[in-house]
Image (cartoon, helix red, strand yellow):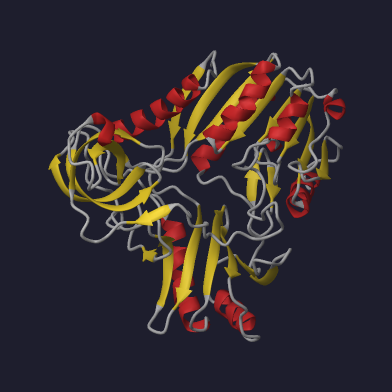
Amino acid sequence: MGTSRYTRTGKWRSGKQKSRSNRQKLPKNTPDIEVKINRISSKGDGVGLANWGEYEPENKPENKVEIYIPNTLPGEVVRAQPLTKIGNRLEADLLELMTPSLERHPPECNSFSSCGGCQLQHMSHSAYRSWKQQSILDLLHNSNINILDFGGLFTSQDQKRRRANFKFKRTKEKSFIGFYASKSYQIIELDNCAVLSEALLATKELIRDGLDRIMPMGITAAINVNHYENGSDVLIIPEQKLPDNTEIELASWASGTNINRVSLVYADQDKSRLLYQNSAPFIKWGGISISPPPGSFLQPTLFGENELQHQVFHAHKDATNCLDLFAGCGTLSAKLLSQKVRITAIDSHKECLEAYQSGYRNVAQDNLLKTETRNLIEAPVRSEFMKDFDGIILDPPRGGAYSQIKQIAQTNCPSVTYVSCNPYSFIKDARILLDAGYQLTHLSILDQFSWTTHSELIGNFQR
């Protein structure tokens, strides 16, 4: 999405998820289960059918339940240890790989078995790409979403991620910085990574060294790192109140590194505080140099950003007046300004829009760019306001843009480009447009999250 990491509720993300209330932890002496894997779930687990229950000893189809086992592939026969019962399904750990798949591949990262960042490094490259594409196409087909032209799957290379949200904890013995383990709040430290860029890993080590000396025992924090064209931008989000002198110490530490900017914000605050800045981080789009505020959303990879911009540009380069919803700092619409397309950019984050406008005014004297601060989830743009636009671009958060899409569906806008990081909300919103007479003329899948189950969709709707 184009907005910052600042949430709709006025809180900064802590990174922790609510626990499931219907989980039933199974006894440690629960018997092992032998099972054949049939498919990969949307979360990346292998799924098979297994006989289950102390009162269901017979091998009958009606006595079988689905069992979800990480790090397994279709066709494999495995022995697994059931751990948890959730409703009518089981979650289990892999104990023994009895019959491996020909598509099994050694993980690219030595932390794969413990880190929760990736789910699919045990698959071959070809099997991974095939599964990622087909799982999306099946989901769209089963939801009766008809695509006139499928553009294919675009996959970023490994070790090209330029954005990360690390977890930090200071204990009595040492500091930990890394990613959460799967289904756990245990922080897994990374010696290497198949996904993150070398620059991002180097910044992580600088942060570890500095915070290990400065942070008091017991402090936990989320640490957002964006790597821009001229260096790294770090935002620290502590979960506990820091001693008064800590911010001064953090600024002193940062001044001795090659980090461009360090800011801090508590989860219940509205605005971050600048602790140190060597030079303002910047990124260039269409000849416009923009300095995003701390914590701004950055497309995970340069490849992915370029592909999204290319497809948006191709869809709207002949337009005269475009509306960019959830615009952020202008990621998707900035290049259209070079074609003299008028842009109205709307987002809930005022600082992002100010950065967009400031960057444009530094290179242009016209009034092609207009901005408006507005919470589009709570107050969508009404259809009557959109009657003069011949192009609409939107890149909403994971929950989609249901209320806004209902308004767009009532317009006569000939071209709508929708970028989504959640196929399920995309389907819900696409159905509204299709029922209103639009056609999904082109759709592509973008994989910026290598070796995970996450995908982005970019679809162009026309009428």
> What's the residue at 28%, 31% (across, down)?
62
Name the quadrant of the C terminus: top right
**Foreground residue among 235 and 130:** 130
Residue 226 visible: yes
Residue 278: percent from the left, percent from the top? 63, 68
As displayed, is residue 159 above or below residue 409?
A: below
Residue 225: percent from the left, percent from the top? 54, 60
Q: How many marks?
A: 0
> What's the residue at 43%, 80% (across, down)?
171
Name the quadrant of the N terminus: top right
Q: Splitting the image into 4 quarters, where does residue 381 fall?
A: top right
Residue 348: percent from the left, percent from the top? 75, 48
Left-right relation of 310 to 412: left
**Foreground residue among 438 and 283:** 438
> What's the residue at 49%, 33% (across, down)?
446
Residue 168: percent from the left, percent from the top? 48, 69
Q: Splitting the image into 4 quarters, where does residue 231 fall?
A: bottom right
Left-right relation of 143 to 269: left
Left-right relation of 272 to 156: right
> What's the residue at 86%, 29% (across, down)?
385
Residue at the far front in the pictured view = 55
As displayed, is residue 215 above or below residue 126?
A: below
Residue 257 visible: no
As displayed, is residue 399 above or below residue 84?
A: above
**Foreground residue among 219 and 327:** 219
